[in-house]
Amino acid sequence: MTDNSSSQTRCAVIAVIGAPNAGKSTLVNAMVGAKVSIVTQKVQTTRARIRGITMEGEAQLVFIDTPGIFLPKRKLDRAMVAAAWDGIDGADATLLLIDAQGWADGESEKGAAGKARVDAVRIIDGLQKANRKAILVVNKIDAMPRDRLLKLVHELDQTGIFSDVFLISAKNGDGMADLKARLVKAAPTGPWLYPEDQLSDISDRLMAAEVTREKLFLRLHQELPYDATVETETWKEAKNGIRIEQTIYVAREGQKGIVLGKNGQTLKIIGAAAREELGDILGSPVHLFIHVKVRAGWADEAARLRQIGLDAVR
């Protein structure tokens, strides 16, 4: 906690929950004004709780970007969903993000949109059972006519768990200023939790792994399933820059070949993209060395889950 005892300071912890791919990380990045969570086309990109911090006058807003909530199967899935629900505990406000188009298209409960709607309904049921209020944030409104949006809001408002409703597009900024103003106004008086120039609570080692994982999925989001993770093995600072060694773990031998590519070209492209972004973030030359290993069942290993900031759940 920062040394800040002014009675004028305010601080709010805000949990951001929703189904996979609802736009939670995009919202948190937009609110912070910097990239603190990776964003890809893949569902369940966010795996652990990441805090993004922003200042608005004397108010500090701490956004908890949580994994998407869905029906878990593997130990990794259960740990991610548990991390999302745990993010609500102690929060001053909870934002439930709903993908407008996904909710509307999922009415027939078929395909990806149907699954997203089922997941969203499951979250609403969980909030109702816990007797918790939330702020409804309908995202991606630019993809839907206003009359359909109003119908959607009316339908969701019937659940009785929402204290406020905001229509936004986290990607282009529509409605974001009003949402932030509402959160600032409601922030309770108290000391800031972080220094005013801090943007996130993520460690450098985990941040580096997340950057590489983002580049991996952006490059291979169609070819590579969700069975891949990245760990930062070593981190050494020297006069000529930072030497980082990482391992990409995949579940099957065939996936290793996909990541490497012909003559290792795919891995080189992924590494170059990660190296460039890490250099910009760290303000120092980065010497990045990436290895690819097959580790069947890594998603059920407690040690692997701890490396990505999750607690194992049986």
Image (tube, rainbow, N blue to C red):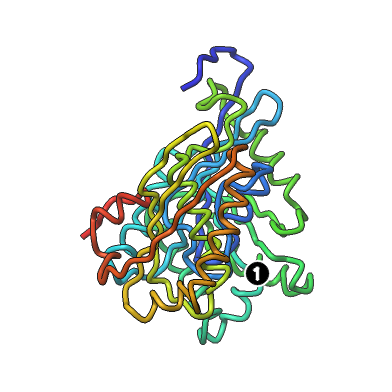
In the rendered image, residue 32, in percent from the top left (x then y), is placed at 64, 42
Q: Determine the image quadrant of residue 77.
A: bottom left
Of residues 179 and 263, the one nearer the viewer is 263
Number of marks drawn:
1
Residue that appears at 43% across and 76% down: 225
Residue that appears at 72% across and 68% down: 150
What quarter of the picture does the C terminus occupy?
A: bottom left
Figure check: 37 above or below 116:
above
Q: In what element is the residue under mark 1?
A: helix
Q: Name the residue tied to disc 1.
A: 100
In the rendered image, residue 78, in percent from the top left (x then y), is placed at 31, 62
Of residues 204 and 48, the one nearer the viewer is 204
User: Is 181 displayed left or right of 298 in the figure?
Assistant: right
Figure check: 274 above or below 158:
above
Q: Residues within 10 Å of mark 1 (few under 14, many from 20)?
A: many
In the rendered image, residue 281, in percent from the top left (x then y), is placed at 61, 42
Of residues 287 and 157, the one nearer the viewer is 287
Of residues 244 and 131, the one nearer the viewer is 244
In the rendered image, residue 311, in percent from the top left (x then y), is placed at 29, 50
Residue that appears at 60% across and 74% down: 102
Figure check: 313 above or below 225:
above
User: Is 143 displayed left or right of 183 in the figure?
Assistant: right
Q: Amino acid at mark 1?
A: Ala
